Image (cartoon, rainbow, N blue to C red):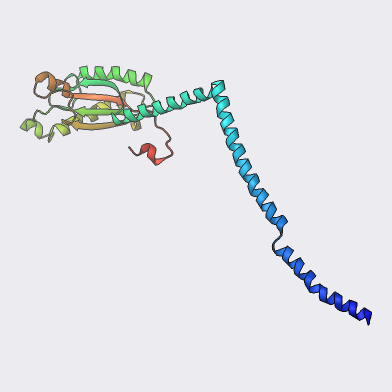
Amino acid sequence: MRPLLLFAGLVVALPGLVGCATTQLVGDPAASRLDSLRAENAALRSRLRRAEDSLRVRDDVATGQYYRDLRVLEDRLNRRTYEVQMLRQGGRTVRVLPADSLFESGTATLTAAGEGRLQAAIGHLERAYSARSVRVEGHADDTPLSESLQERFTSNWELSAARATAVARYLIAHSTLAPSQFAALAYGTTAPVASNATAPGRHRNRRVRIAVLPPLQDYSRPVDTSW
């Protein structure tokens, strides 16, 4: 009978052993500890990177590299600011030529003296700005055109456009610059530089401005060109 009692005891004890094994598999403390250590390790690595960055900045300051990098960035910012300002102002002025020195009164036909003045401008463009975009602007005073002139030019706006185009065509024909580098614009009476109430003022307002634009930049973000 004793062997039977021992066997029965073993049978009774087995359910308890099975329950313990199941509990360890479901809530393994070793696995939980491992996850905790991994998270702590990641946090420590992040702190280490921040400390290394801080030390690198301190080293750069100590060696002067920080200030050299700062000057480079400031120079780039100043250059971009200047380029934006130049673009807004229509570029760097190369020549401002009185229309009276280029054309006969009320016409858009260049005189011999006018062509001579443009030749000097061509030399300057070819030497200093051979790769730049060239902007030719026509400006006029506010004196109304006579009836005979209105048969050809509806207003001073059309006259200033014809004069800007004539200058641009001459520059293209007699320079080594490509036609695609040129643009002709007409302002008419909208951008005076002096009062139209006096003869000297009107003389200054009748003009052709030749300007060059800054080199084109490869802007990668819309904000850089949103202005």
Of residues 88 and 101, the one drawn nearer to the viewer in this rendering: 88
Relative to 124, 47 lies left or right: right
Residue 138 at least partly seen: yes
In this picture, residue 91 sits left or right of residue 149: right
Residue 81 location, x and y as percent?
Answer: 36, 28
Q: Quadrant of residue 53?
A: top right
Query: Within the image, what quadrant is residue 222 found in?
Result: top left
Q: Where in the figure is residue 122, as x and y percent of width and height?
A: 31, 20
The residue sitting at 42% across, 36% down in the picture is 219
Quadrant where the C terminus is found in the figure: top left
For image coordinates 29% across by 17% down, the residue present is: 120
The quarter of the image holding the N terminus is bottom right
Q: Residue 93 appears at what percent x and percent y?
A: 29, 23
Specify the farthest residue to the bottom: 1
- Image-quadrant location for residue 63: top right
Of 221 and 124, the residue lying toward us: 221
Q: What residue is at 74 percent from the left and 67 percent from the top? A: 22
